[in-house]
Image (spheres, rainbow, N blue to C red):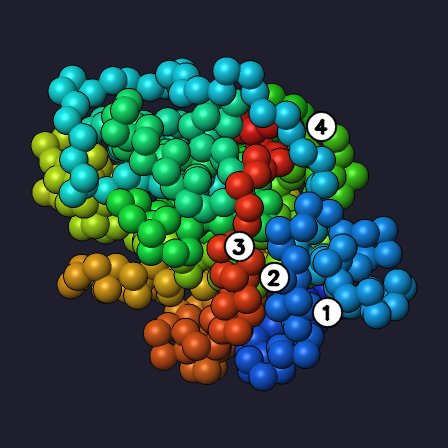
């Protein structure tokens, strides 16, 4: 299964065997534990169904029993305790005084604005260091856009109820011309983004961008490494690789470990199978998931034609793209033991990224794009491990990332259906969120 390159790797044989043994026991067994048949979830996740009945309850009792539970139920019965993957802070923010739309810092009023109900409002979920700023610049060249959600200014995140949230977005378009809204926050597990019902989704087009988690990590290293030398010193292991820094108060929810999974699932602590499935269930609801390798195709073939954006460098498929200067990989001089350990820590994000890649490919096809560039079928975890450890792994056909195997990457259908019922049943209540522009 494994063939070592002629190059000398600094990774010890013991470390290699340890990583591969763990990997082959999961990836090549098709993550059987993570992707069990729907029937296997009926008992494990039946608490989701029960929790839906009490989704409107503001709090659960200290015994973990819903206030609306039958009095015959034992007070110590915890069967109605909110599942861990739906729990978050119980703190409720105060609604800002004089809560009204406030012109955002990066807002630019359109030269001529006439609201068009036939055009789509782009609702983008901006995962940090996933090219969201470039996507904002695209929209900002053609329409009024918010760079990030500012809850206190009533741009978004005004309600847990998807219909109220959707109406707020639509009203901001028809009154102020804001046709692009960017959410840049960690989503509470129960927050309905993207929206589920057709009525809430009307007139909206949901997008997000997903990068290879290692590339995203490197972007962060370049961005912050020059500012805070305790994060990263070229060629030296540093506190950057370990929990004591990443989970400290200095970074809070912006911790770089598995941020994509955390932000899509609301996971504040250890990432579980349920958190990964929540993230995947959300991805299924986006109108267009944009994988990093398919960005140009998605922009030119789907996003630009969506509202007839043409005539500028961002929406010009005939423009010759000059090759970008290849930046040096800041991890090149880092001991491969540390890189291997870090790759393993990012396993949930690699799994989510592979799912995003194949979803992106399928969605572009569904939007009518004929010449979609091929997506690498090598699982990203394996490709990254091979790159940094000089190891070549043979990937069997049944473990490749392609449309034939997409059913193996999907989250359990019944689990997603239960999550949709949760997201659809929220009352009109101001959400408590963490992130840019949020009430925290």
**Disc 3 designates what residue?**
425
- Which SS class for mark 4? loop
Q: Which numbered disc, 2 or 3, marks the residue that appears first in the sequence?
A: 2
Depth check: give the residue in front, 101 or 391: 101
> Where does residue 420 sit, x and y in percent of width and height?
49, 61
Q: Which dot marks residue 52?
A: 2
For disc 1, the neighbor class at 10 Å (few under 14, some 14 to 19, many from 20) is: few
Looking at the image, do the residues carrying marks 2 and 3 touch, with CB atoms under 8 Å apart?
A: yes
Q: Nearer the viewer, mark 1 or mark 2?
A: 2
Q: Nearer the viewer, mark 2 or mark 4?
A: 2
Which residue is at a point 38% across and 41% down the rendered structure image?
A: 166
Q: Which numbered disc, 1 or 2, marks the residue that appears first in the sequence?
A: 1
**Disc 4 designates what residue?**
250
For disc 2, the neighbor class at 10 Å (few under 14, some 14 to 19, many from 20) is: many
Q: Which dot marks residue 18?
A: 1
For disc 3, the neighbor class at 10 Å (few under 14, some 14 to 19, many from 20) is: some
Please identify the quarter of the rendering in which residue 240 is found.
top right
Q: CA distance from mark 4 to mark 3?
A: 35 Å
């Amino acid at each position: 299964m494994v063939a070592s390159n002629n190059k000398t790797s600094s990774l010890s044989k013991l470390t290699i065997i340890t990583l591969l043994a763990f990997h082959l026991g999961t990836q090549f067994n098709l993550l059987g534990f993570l992707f069990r048949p729907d029937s296997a979830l009926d008992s494990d996740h039946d608490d989701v169904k029960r929790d839906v009945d009490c989704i409107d309850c503001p709090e659960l009792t200290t015994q973990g029993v819903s206030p609306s539970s039958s009095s015959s139920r034992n007070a110590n019965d915890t069967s109605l305790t909110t599942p861990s993957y739906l729990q978050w802070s119980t703190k409720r923010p105060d609604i800002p005084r004089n809560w009204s739309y406030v012109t955002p810092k990066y807002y630019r009023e359109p030269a001529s604005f006439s609201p068009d109900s036939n055009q789509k409002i782009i609702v983008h979920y901006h995962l940090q260091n996933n090219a969201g700023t470039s996507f904002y610049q695209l929209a900002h060249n053609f329409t009024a856009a918010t760079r990030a959600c500012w809850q206190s200014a009533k741009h978004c995140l005004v309600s847990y109820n998807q219909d109220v949230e959707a109406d707020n977005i639509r009203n901001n378009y028809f009154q102020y011309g804001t046709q692009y809204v960017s959410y840049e926050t960690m989503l509470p597990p129960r927050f309905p983004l993207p929206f589920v019902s057709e009525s809430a989704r009307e007139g909206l087009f949901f997008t997000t961008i997903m990068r290879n988690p290692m590339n995203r990590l490197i972007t962060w290293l370049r961005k912050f490494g020059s500012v805070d030398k305790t994060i990263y010193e070229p060629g030296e292991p540093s506190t950057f690789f370990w929990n004591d820094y990443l989970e400290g108060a200095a970074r809070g929810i912006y911790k770089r470990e598995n941020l994509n999974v955390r932000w899509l699932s609301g996971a504040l602590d250890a990432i579980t199978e349920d958190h990964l499935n929540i993230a995947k269930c959300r991805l299924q609801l986006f109108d267009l998931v944009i994988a990093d390798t398919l960005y140009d195709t998605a922009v030119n073939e789907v996003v630009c034609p969506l509202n007839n954006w043409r005539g500028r460098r961002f929406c010009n498929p005939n423009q010759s793209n000059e090759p970008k200067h290849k930046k040096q990989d800041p991890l090149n001089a880092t001991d491969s033991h540390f890189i291997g350990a870090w790759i393993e820590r990012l396993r949930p994000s690699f799994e989510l990224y592979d799912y995003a890649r194949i979803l992106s490919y399928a969605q572009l096809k569904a939007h009518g794009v004929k010449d979609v560039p091929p997506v690498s079928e090598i699982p990203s975890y394996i490709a990254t491990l091979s790159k940094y450890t000089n190891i070549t792994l043979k990937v069997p056909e049944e473990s490749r990332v392609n449309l034939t195997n997409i059913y193996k990457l999907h989250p359990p259908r019944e689990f997603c259906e239960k999550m949709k019922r949760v997201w659809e049943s929220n009352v009109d209540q101001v959400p408590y969120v963490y992130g840019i522009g949020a009430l925290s």
